[in-house]
Amino acid sequence: MAGKFEAPRRKGRGLWLIVPLLLLLLAMGCLAMTLRVGREEPTEGTLPSFTVPVEVTQLPSAETTEATEPPVEITANAAIAVQGDLLMHATFFQQKYNPACRLGTGEYDFSSIFRYLSPYTENADYAVANLETTLGGDEFPYQGNPTFNCPDPILDAVKAAGYDLLLTANNHSYDTLMTGIDRTLEKSREAGLDTLGTRLNAEEDRFTVKEINGIKIGMVCYTYTMTMSGGKPKLNDNAPVAKPEQINYFSYNNLSGFYDEVGAIMEEMKAQGAEATMLYIHWGTEYEVEENQTQRKIAQKMCDLGFDVIVGGHPHVVQPMALLESTVDPAHKTVCIYSLGNAVSNQRRQLMRLKTGHTEDGALFTVTFEKWSDGTVAVADCNVLPTWVNLYENSDGKNEYNILPLDAQKREQWAEIFDVSEEVCQELQNSYDRTMAIVGDGLETCREYLAQRP
């Protein structure tokens, strides 16, 4: 009937609709909470309770990865052995001294000098010695000090002993005048030996860039001059050198000019592809077992110019080694040995004002360069083999000179190897001790530094 009260029925129908709706909302809320919890990052050490699937990108295979830099490796090495002065006194070849090198009138064989040393020089990739004499030929008398002139067969012995290069710039280079300078070069080259320090004409380079085992090493050799006369050097109180452009020399009174000249040579060597550099220099004070202040000054400047190795001679005794640091580039260091002493001579202690025996001592200095796959070239190692000159009467009754390599690893065999008495073995030990007392500390410093280089 119209107008009757029906509210309770309408109220009952509303609750029936609302309750399912509330249950649906409650279920959806629980689901949302579950999803949120599932998306939370797992704490360290736990696995997630829920993970949302994501698209996984495969890592590129070895074939598709960009090539990584290959490891830097050593690709080449070159060992250069350098000997001191071949100081060829008259006692080696003049008949009155009854030398083993004199076979007969006009015939000479100097090979006995190098009999025991040659295995070491032959083992080097490149061997060097200072030729402290001229080869002026028969035009001049064959003699020793003060104007040296030696018979040509010394070259055959040098070559056979494994040497490759002769240094020809020293204070005796002009002892037989221009004939000596020119002829020494010509005969040395004919014998298959390289030369450095003098040249046949102004067109030849003052230096060489020698490729040894794939490493290009720039080398230059200089000698001091005693005095200058009319703008020309006087090397040994001889007449001024007629053609000074044929010899590399410097004056202690004009070191700045020397530095400029060598600096230009350094640039030329690099332009010709030099990857490492060496300077051979005749300098210092004779018979002084320590380098002087001027030697140190010059050496430091050569280090600043970028030389990797400096090898000195002239004092006729061994002088110390040093590791120099450039004042221009502190990362650059130079290995320097101030003097190698005599390789061979007749400067016996009983004949010398210096009675210590140092003039009988010498050193075979070896430096090893390494080249890496990235193109870097550097000094990798250096070493010193002390030597001693043995003078004795051989079984033929002739006076023989031998350069004896004092290899410490073979010390127990010295008597047998060199066929000498125990008394002579003591001389060998004394010589070894003298040399190592001079070079030992510097050598150790150099080798420790080189061993630590990356």
Image (tube, rainbow, N blue to C red):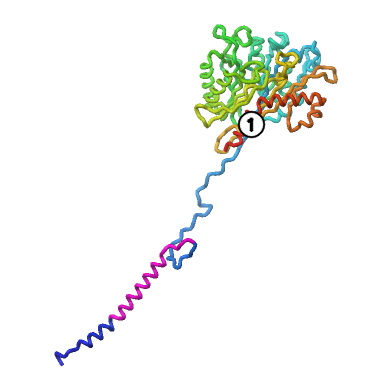
Q: Nearer the viewer, residue 247 or 179?
A: 247
Residue placed furthest toward the left: 3
- Image coords of residue 273 (percent x, y): 55, 28
- Image coords of residue 277 (percent x, y): 57, 27
User: What kind of secondary structure does the magenta stretch mostly adopt?
Assistant: helix
Location of residue 49 (image quadrant): bottom left
Query: Was residue 81 drawn as part of the magenta stretch in this picture?
Result: no
Above or below: residue 384 compared with residue 252: below
Residue linked to disc 1: 444
- Image coords of residue 283 (percent x, y): 61, 17
- Tell me if I can see residue 124 in this picture: yes
Residue under the point 15% across and 93% down: 1
Query: Which range is magenta?
Result: 18-44
Location of residue 24 (image quadrant): bottom left
The C terminus appears in which quarter of the rendering?
top right
Report the amino acid beneath label 1: Glu
